[in-house]
Amino acid sequence: MEFIIKAKGHKNVSATHKTTLEITKEDYLTPTGHCIIGIDADKSMTDFSEEFKEKLRNAKKIIVEIEVEGIKDTIIGEGHKDLILNHPTDMVIRKSNYICPRTLMINANKSAKDINREIVKKLKEGKELIFKIIV
């Protein structure tokens, strides 16, 4: 099962955070948002079906594929039975096992700083981001 979100980059994308990566429905990004790689997302966790949320909670492996202008990167993490998955604007991938309403997956193999720098460069130019969640 997969869920696709479209977002866009912003001139303030730095993608330097060491433990998290985020996309948001917010339409702005301050220079301190080091984990945010995409803004103005067309969907959020509130758009997930209950079936999809249950699959995420029970998943031993969640894959997120990010793509910008044909350049792809893949992040692999895990679900957890306690995932809340109800934040109206933010979706966070975490290397840690911390869970809050914004958490999409935990124990991820990558954070913002690990993303392909060609993707980051294009996101700084405001290019479209395709964020595909596969479970």
Image (tube, grey):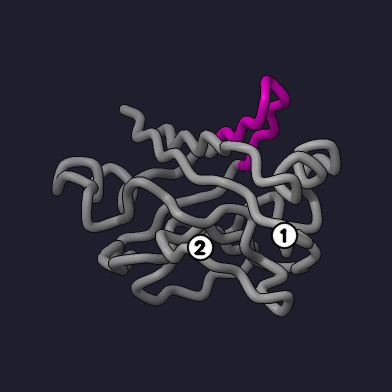
Question: Which disc is residue 92 wearing?
Answer: 2
Could you say whether the residue bearing mark 1 is in a helix, strand or loop?
A: loop
Q: Is residue 2 above or below residue 31?
A: above
Q: CA distance from mark 2 to mark 1?
A: 15 Å
Check disc 1 and report the residue beneath it. Answer: 13
In the rendered structure, does residue 67 fall within the stretch colored magenta?
yes
Please report the residue visible at 43 percent of the width from the left and 32 percent of the height from the top. 134
Is the residue 95 above or below the residue 132 in the image? Answer: below
Q: Quadrant of residue 68?
A: top right
Quarter of the image where the N terminus is located: top left
Which segment did they paint magenta?
65-75
Residue 104, given in percent of the width and then of the height, sits at 43, 57
Q: Residue furthest left?
A: 50
Q: Amino acid at mark 1?
A: Val
Query: In the image, which is nearer the foreground, mark 2 or mark 1?
Result: 1
Query: Sequence order check: which comes first, mark 2 or mark 1?
Result: 1
Residue visible at 72% across and 70% down in the picture: 34
**Looking at the picture, which amino acid does disc 2 mark?**
Val
Kindly identify which numbered label has been placed on residue 98. none
Q: Residue at x 59, y 58 (%)?
A: 107
Is 107 part of what is drawn in magenta? no
- Which x, y percent locates residue 39? 52, 56
Prevailing secondary structure class for the magenta stretch in the rendered image: strand
Residue 24 percent across, percent down from the top left: 46, 61
Relative placement, left or right, of 12 versus 50 is: right
Along the line of sight, which residue is nearer the eye, 114 or 128? 128
Q: Quadrant of the C terminus?
A: top left
In the displayed structure, 126 sits above or below 31; it is above
Q: Give SS at disc 2.
A: strand
